[in-house]
Image: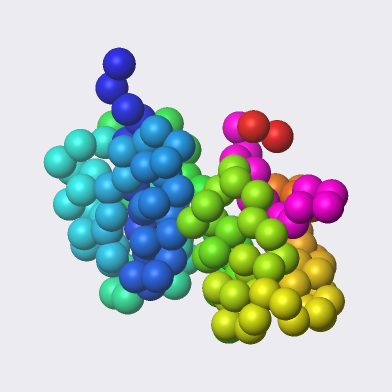
Amino acid sequence: MARQRILIVEDEPDIVKVLEFSLKQAGFEPVVAYDGEQARSRIQHQVPDLVLLDLMLPGVPGTEICKQLKGSSKTANVPVLMEQEVVLTALEFKLLVSLMARAGRVQSREQLLDEVWELSPETRTRTVDTHVKRLREKLGQARDLLETVRGSGYRLVEPSVK
């Protein structure tokens, strides 16, 4: 059975890497476009099963790409997910990237302290818990995907699992 193709239209390489990795891990075939023109080309070549679309792209804005998709009989039924901008601090972003890179696996507070903050695992601090709390607040409806595993740490669960 062919894997579902997901077109990622995003101009930030770090975000693309995280999305691409997570989608591959989940069994999808990610295809990347870094701007609106590349997106048009990829869609013309082969219509994706889903489009993850950034709103703020260089050149053609994401809203225009969405209008074009929905205005064509060939692509009108392709689902489009446009991620609302969420402003994160550098550490919140680094924490999210760390959790996404190991989606589905528990990461201990010690692992996160070492990887995200580059602090000794023996350090006694509530920093991880505080940042996870703030990150959940900023994630809105997706906050439930960031799960506390009592006595072990945190994990980002895959939406299909929850």
In-front residue for pair 13/106: 106
Residue 70: in sight, yes or no?
no
Q: Is residue 143 left or right of residue 96?
A: right
Image position, residue 62 (x, y; %):
41, 62
In-front residue for pair 139/66: 139
Q: Residue at x 34, y 70 (%)?
A: 13
Image position, residue 37 (x, y; %):
22, 62
* Magenta residues (range): 149-160
Instruction: Tell me where residue 32 sits by quadrant.
Output: bottom left
Residue 33: in sight, yes or no?
yes
Q: Is residue 14 left or right of residue 41?
A: right
In-front residue for pair 56/120: 120
Is 27 located above or below residue 97 in the figure? Answer: above
Query: Number of labelled discs?
Result: 0
Is 46 located above or below residue 108 in the figure? Answer: above
Q: Residue at x 84, y 49 (%)?
A: 150
Is 122 located above or below residue 38 in the figure? Answer: below
Q: Is residue 84 left or right of residue 17?
A: right
Instruction: Tell me where residue 86 sits by quadrant.
Output: bottom right
Is 109 located above or below residue 127 in the figure? Answer: above
The reply to whether the magenta stretch includes residue 158 is: yes
Q: Residue at x 65, y 81 (%)?
A: 120
